[in-house]
Amino acid sequence: MNLEIRQYTRDRIPDVLDFERRLREEENYYNWPIDDKYIRSVENSFEDPAFQTSLSLLAYVDGKVVGRMDTTMIASHFDGSKKAYLDWICVIKSYRHLGVAQRMMEQLLKCLRQRNIDTLIALTAANEEAQRFYRSIPNSVMRDVGIWIDV
């Protein structure tokens, strides 16, 4: 498998939309529609300064996206630290257990080290497959409890 990790840029939106559609064909539990509103929001995110601290990576096999990872940087006055938050990682089901997520994670950690960020925080999905993946990451520790608060 010829796997290539690339940064998600505006010109790759069509690749990601194709990924989103194929993802739903294999697993039908993603809760947001791929409609004009969604597409406009994604396009606008590349122009909005609030997204300057975002870093998203795409895993390509044979010219198609098979995995996606989205993160953002967090700077805190609490302790003067800079951390990153892993918002989402997903690999198309038929490409799981082939090292795609691991390769994306390796590339992400490399990018974070280059930005002098030494901690990555993630909420983990409750399913066992996701839990196994996060436990397999070197130097990772499962601790604390995450919450979602709708504002």
Image: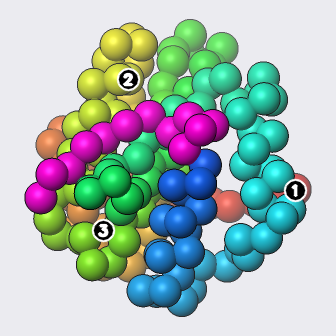
Amino acid type indicated by mark 1: Val
For marks 2 and 3, the one nearer the N-term is: 2
Report how many numbered discs are placed on residues in the image.
3
Q: Is residue 141 left or right of residue 117?
A: left
Q: Is residue 133 left or right of residue 16?
A: left
Q: CA distance from mark 1 to mark 3?
A: 27 Å
Using the image, tell me which numbered label, if any, was put on residue 95.
none
Q: Is residue 56 left or right of residue 110?
A: right
Of the two numbered discs 2 and 1 in the rendering, the one whose residue sits closer to the viewer = 2
Q: Which residue is mark 2?
A: 112
User: Which residue appears at 81% of the width and 40% of the height?
Assistant: 44
Q: Which residues are magenta?
A: 1-12
Q: For the N terminus, which image quadrant?
A: bottom left
Q: Secondary structure at mark 3?
A: helix
Q: CA distance from mark 2 to mark 1?
A: 29 Å
For marks 2 and 1, the one nearer the N-term is: 2
Q: How is the image coloured?
A: rainbow
Amino acid type indicated by mark 3: Gln
Contact (CB < 8 A) between labels 2 and 3? no
Q: Is residue 117 left or right of residue 25?
A: left
Q: What x and y, as percent, mark residue 6? A: 37, 37
Q: Which residue is mark 3?
A: 131
User: Which residue appears at 54% of the width and 44% of the height?
Assistant: 12
User: Which residue appears at 37% of the width and 71% of the height?
Assistant: 92
Contact (CB < 8 A) between labels 2 and 1? no
Q: What x and y, as percent, mark residue 62? A: 26, 57
Q: What x and y, as percent, mark residue 11? A: 59, 38
User: Which residue appears at 80% of the width and 50% of the height?
Assistant: 41
Decide which of 150, 53 is in the foreground and name it. 53
Q: Which residue is mark 1?
A: 151
Q: Is residue 85 above or below residue 116?
A: below
